[in-house]
Image (cartoon, coloured by chain):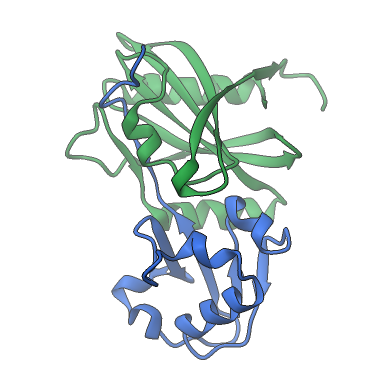
Chain colours: A blue, B green
Amino acid sequence: MKILIPTPLRQYAGKQDAVEVPAQTVGEALSRLTAQYSDLRRHLYTDDGKLRAFVNLYLNDEDIRYLQKENTPVRDGDTLSIVPSIAGGCYYLAVGF
Amino acid sequence: MLTIRQSELDALRGHGEDTYPHECCGVMLGRMEGDERVVEAVARASNTRVDSPHNRYNIDPRELVRIQRESRERGWDIVGFYHSHPDHPACWSQTDLAEAHWVGCSYVITSVEQGRATVTSSFALAGTMEEDKRFVDEELRVLAAEAAD
């Protein structure tokens, strides 16, 4: 399956925007990805091994939280997108302005 | 530095006027050239913070997946994001920083005062990872609509 690497993480994945890995589940795909590119691990996971809260994983168009999370089975041709959250707002202006 | 054509800058500023008094948000698509980002197009996104749209924004990751897919088909990358600050300065807030996770990308903010876009500023999210990220002022280079890169 193909894993799409977001812009901020490409420098840790050989500068690639996508990586192909063989896998049966989402979890296996991520394990293979971080085994191949070990620097990615600290950007995707906390020190206690949990996926960082701002990292969203989409299997094709579905959030894996609403599937079987990292146990979600994958098939040939599937695409896993790693999507860091995008949010913010003018609430709490920067100090010093 | 962020380079953008006048037409695309007008588009993202106009988005802020269209959504006033709520925050608008969207994605900037283009290419990375070393430390510089070149915008080819902007893509509007929906603000899912319907609970507090006047001072918060959030882009549904599912929408971003779609935008990214369409962008890849055109050979473009996501190079940054934009949003507006209704009746607030075009400066990043602590919320903006806390919720920014695309290190290496540009974050553009437009102040929309009484429904009119005024100042637009660009900030690069610098750092090596989540724990040392910071916003850095960056030059916003605007190209005339007819200019070729």
Q: Between residues B117 and A30, which one lies in front from this camera angle?
A: A30
Q: Is residue B27 left or right of residue A97?
A: right
Residue depicted at 60% across the width and 64% down the height = A39
Residue depicted at 57% across the width and 22% down the height = B9
Q: Is residue A83 left or right of residue B59?
A: right
Rendered-image quadrant of the C terminus of chain A: top left
Q: Is residue A24 left or right of residue A87?
A: right
Q: Between residues B127 and A56, which one lies in front from this camera angle?
A: B127
From the top left corner, tell me how far across and down residue B19 is, in percent: 33, 26
Q: Is residue B98 visible?
A: yes
From the top left corner, tell me how far across and down residue B140 is, in percent: 63, 19
**Which residue occupies the extreme bottom position in the image?**
A24
Q: Between residues B49 and B94, which one lies in front from this camera angle?
A: B94
**Which residue occupies the extreme right position in the image?**
B148
Look at the picture and state if B18 lies above or below B100: above
Residue depicted at 26% across the width and 20% down the height = B21
Residue A70: quadrant of the picture? bottom left
Residue depicted at 29% across the width and 13% down the height = B87
Residue B57: quadrant of the picture? top left
Q: Is residue A82 visible?
A: no
